[in-house]
Image (cartoon, rainbow, N blue to C red):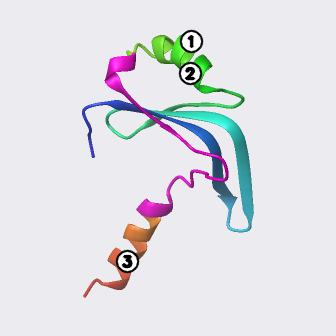
Amino acid sequence: MATTKDSVFVGTFIHSKSLDTLEYLQNTAVFVDRHGKIVLVEPECDLQRAKEALIPRLGWTLEGVNITIAGEGQFFFPGFIGMFRYVVGILTRD
């Protein structure tokens, strides 16, 4: 699904490397283009570095970017919503 802006997510990410292994990425920025494609995952990246170095390197502008920051005790779990929709779609098919 295309949006009108690119997106930057900053904080802790938890993702599945395999069926029995999770990886925790703290202080990480994930850059997603307006078409929903992850274009950069940058470990050890705070908001200032994202704004000053990486957004310009991608050819993006601050005005054209949605920025979401995970607060204390929060994290991102990429793919969880998409997988939920996929499983529900399978379970509700005739």
Q: Does residue 67 show up magenta in the picture? A: yes
Q: Residue at the location (46% across, 16% down)?
A: 58
- The answer for how far apart the CA atoms under marks 1 and 3 are is 40 Å
Report the residue marked by disc 2. Answer: 50
Residue type indicated by callout 3: Val
Report the residue marked by disc 3. Answer: 88
- The answer for how far apart the CA atoms under marks 2 and 3 are is 36 Å
Q: Position of residue 35 (x, y in %)?
A: 32, 37
Q: Outermost residue toward the bottom?
A: 94
Residue type indicated by callout 1: Ala
Q: Secondary structure at mark 3?
A: helix
Q: Position of residue 33 (x, y in %)?
A: 38, 31
Q: Residue at the location (25% across, 88% down)?
A: 94
Q: Nearer the viewer, residue 74 or 35?
A: 74
Q: Is residue 94 above or below residue 33?
A: below
How dense is the environment of label 3, judged by Cα within 10 Å: few (below 14), some, or many (20 and up)? Answer: few
Q: Position of residue 6 (x, y in %)?
A: 36, 30
Question: Where are the magenta residues, as a range?
Answer: 62-82
- The answer for how far apart the CA atoms under marks 2 and 1 are is 6 Å
The answer to whether marks 2 and 3 mark residues whose Cβ atoms lie closer than 8 Å is no
Q: Is residue 94 above or below residue 76?
A: below
Q: Does residue 31 show up magenta in the picture? A: no
Report the residue marked by disc 1. Answer: 53
Of marks 2 and 3, the one in the foreground: 2
**Callout count:** 3
How dense is the environment of label 2, judged by Cα within 10 Å: few (below 14), some, or many (20 and up)? Answer: many
The answer to whether marks 2 and 1 mark residues whose Cβ atoms lie closer than 8 Å is yes
Q: Residue at the location (59% across, 19% down)?
A: 48
